[in-house]
Image (spheres, helix red, strand yellow):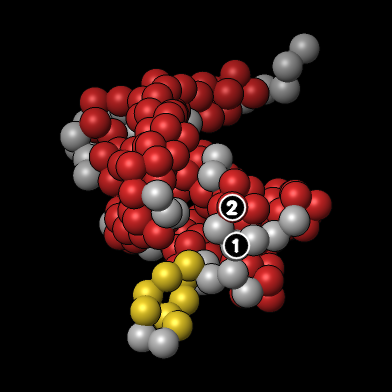
Amino acid sequence: AAPVGAAGDAASDELEGVSFKTAMRSRTIYVLAIGSSCLWFTFQGINSQIQIFFELEAGLSPVDATRLYSSIFGFSVAGKFLFGAISDRYPKRYVMRASSALLLIGCLSIFTIDAGIFGLTSNVYQLALFTALFGLGYGGSFTMIQLVAVESFGRRALGKLLGIIIGIDSFGGMLGTILPGQMKTATGSYLFPFSVVSVVAFVALINVLLIKPVPAATGDPGGSPATP
């Protein structure tokens, strides 16, 4: 038999968090959805094109280009564990801010100014730095999206809210897969598409900075996930 009070505890856990209606009236659902969509645009915008850039514009051999490209995913694994572990000790929205900032820094690290001309680097050491920074930021930001949703809204309406967030960020990922390649074809260089990706990463960071836990509305059953 279940321990006395177990059913009540289960019901309490089930109701933890804000209602779907309250969440949809908050700013947080929109900035989290837009921010995660921009993050996915950034992920896909880089990952779908970077190996081609390494070979065609940076001048790396196919072997070296593949090695650098693969290292992004190696660093992303490290980023997932690192930022996930940090989020066990600190508010998850703060950790997402840090990972999103690192992702933006990674995007910017691929640019250079040579003789007063703004362009993309072909220096192998700078490209290696790019893969490390971008990969860590990619892995951390990827991990934090759903964790921040739980922290912001609780579990009461989490399934519906994640459905909205994931649907919107999937659209961002789709655009990130398609548009940079088309921009490169139109301009003949990756300078413009990677600049656009960096701007989108900046927009993602701005939205992430605006995320706050949503307090339960007056009369809304269930506890508030809000934290200081």
Q: Position of residue 174 (x, y in %)?
A: 43, 29
Q: Where is residue 79 in the image (x, y as percent from the top left)?
A: 67, 57
Q: Which residue is drawn at 57% across and 28% down?
A: 9
Q: Secondary structure under badge 1?
A: loop
Q: Residue at x 48, y 62 (%)?
A: 107
Badge 1: residue crowd in 10 Å (few <14, some 14–19, many ≥20): some
Q: Identify the residue position indicated by label 2 in the image.
A: 56
The image shows residue 73, relative to residue 220, as above or below, that is: below
Q: How far apart are marks 2 and 1 (CA)?
A: 6 Å
Q: Secondary structure under badge 2?
A: helix
Q: Residue at x 48, y 67 (%)?
A: 120
Mark seen at residue 58: 1
The image shows residue 218, relative to residue 95, as above or below, that is: above
Q: Locate the C terminus and report the quarter of the image it occupies.
A: bottom left
Residue closer to the observer: 177 or 80: 177
Residue closer to the observer: 174 or 181: 181
Please state which amino acid type lies under the numbered disc 1.
Ala
The image shows residue 36, relative to residue 18, as above or below, that is: below
Q: Do the residues labelled 2 and 1 touch (CB within 8 Å)?
A: yes
Tell me if 102 is positioned left or right of 136 in this view. Answer: left
Q: Which residue is drawn at 36% across and 86% down?
A: 116
Mark seen at residue 86: none
Residue furthest to the bottom = 115
Q: Where is residue 184 in the image (x, y as percent from the top left)?
A: 41, 45
Which quadrant would residue 8 be assigned to in this image? top right
Tell me if 221 is positioned left or right of 166 in this view. Answer: left
Which quadrant would residue 30 be assigned to in this image? top left
Asked whether residue 154 is in view, the answer is no
Residue closer to the observer: 132 or 77: 132
Please state which amino acid type lies under the numbered disc 2.
Leu
